Image: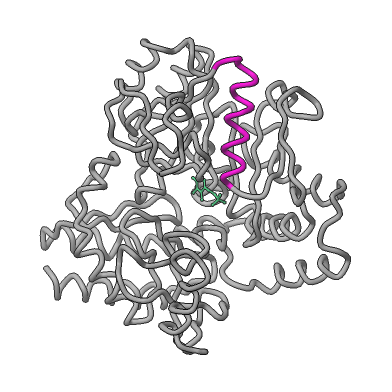
Amino acid sequence: MTNNTELFTKAKQLMPGGVSSPVRAFKSVGGTPRFIKSGQGSAIYDEEGHRYIDFIGSWGPLILGHAHPKIVKAIQETAARGTSFGAPTAKETMLAQDIVDFVPSIEKVRFVNSGTEATMSALRLARGFTGRKEIVKFAGCYHGHSDGLLIKAGSGATTLGVPDSAGVPAEITQLTVPAVFNDPEGLETIFKQRGESIAAVIIEPVAGNMGVIPPAPGFLEKTRDLCSHYGSLLIFDEVMSGFRVDRGGAQELYGVTPDLTCLGKIIGGGLPVGAYGGKNEIMEFVAPAGPVYQAGTLSGNPLAITAGHETLKIINTPGFYEKLEQKILLFDQALLPEIKKHKWKLCFQRVGSMATLFFRAGPVNTYTDALQADTTLFKKFHQYLLKEGIYFPPSQFEAFFISAAHTTAEIEKTIEILLDYCYKNY
Ligand SMILES: *Cc1c(COP(=O)(O)O)cnc(C)c1O
């Protein structure tokens, strides 16, 4: 079977929606998902032999591109010595050292297997540490799929959370207080009403899961101040932005230091991983040092840890982020003047090497803004790009990424195709 349609039909018989994670099913853009056979550098190849320039990069982890020779070699050598021991390894300490060196807020770190686990555990820790129950979450921010974080966006800041998924009891999400991204006054109101019961505020410091929305000037600072004032912990979910927008993540880029940070994606070099870390006094609450229980059979497994460590080594070469930025800047330089000139209802937003082209006039500052994008136009756009061999996220509300493997020529070609679409459709 080498045909995407046949593969999808068979997959749907055996797996819900035919996929292991919902967005992969192409539901919002239509058409058949591509079944990917291999990847090399900036390109992926489907089972039918088509080549695509990949701007998803496995949804963020592949900042070095696919099958980077050094990462592959390190994984092979490690695998040959055993894939998991359920015991400490020297490699974990090495990756922990990298993370502590690079991420300003982290003095101590715990490895887990996904971003979901990282945020779920960080919240448990925040509750254990503060002895409080409530958490604040911003509409449109995604923090993985644990129960308490699946709350519907958009309800007023004074209403308690309503579950976003079947199977999540309202009793659980009642402890999650929704807030509006980039609305410092709204957050202040929440704190004035219930500051003493808030264990933590969790936020994507650069929102990436409603499309890329940078924090408005002063917003992260205000959030930091409110947390400090009320004795609540500030948790930066940098699963996407960590090692992406800068070596030290958004906290380095914006100079705002949270109490706890969640990581994932890039620190696993393409293998399943997550981590949470922060101030020593807080992390010492985690078992076995402290009373907050959290564990994992495959946590810190040598394969993921090695892939992460090798990735961070390469990222830490001088000029790495500058080069990445120079390349993605080509999008800004080509798109922004054209959007302005033709008054297209488009808005390109970018932080470091993550970006979104919103199909609406800008700026996009909140989830409500993002939801006003024209998803029908986006759908056509996605199909057009795919036909031209450009693999973009199959949703308007996702970030696209470039990797160190993308060439200037590939990016220029992509921009040309993208502009072509606009000339034809506006
Ligand atoms: C991807 C992501 C997660 C979830 O990570 P998984 O590894 O998919 O569980 C959590 N938070 C943010 C900000 C993410 O981008």
The relative height of residue 175 versus residue 414 in the rendered view (above or below) is: above
Residue 303 position in % (x across, y down): 76, 60
The magenta segment is 115-132
Number of labelled discs?
0
| Res. 64 image quadrant | bottom right
| 401 or 321: nearer the viewer | 401
Residue 35 in sight from this viewpoint: yes
Q: Main secondary structure of the magenta part?
A: helix
Whether residue 130 is in magenta: the answer is: yes
Residue 361 position in % (x across, y down): 17, 51
| Res. 426 image quadrant | bottom left
Residue 171 position in % (x across, y down): 45, 26
The relative height of residue 244 versus residue 234 in the rendered view (above or below) is: below
At a point 58% along the width and 54% down the height, the residue shown is 265
Q: Is residue 361 left or right of residue 383?
A: left
At a point 47% along the width and 23% down the height, the residue shown is 224
**Colouring used for the render:** one colour
Whether residue 328 is in magenta: the answer is: no
Residue 416 in sight from this viewpoint: no
Q: Is residue 72 left or right of residue 355?
A: right
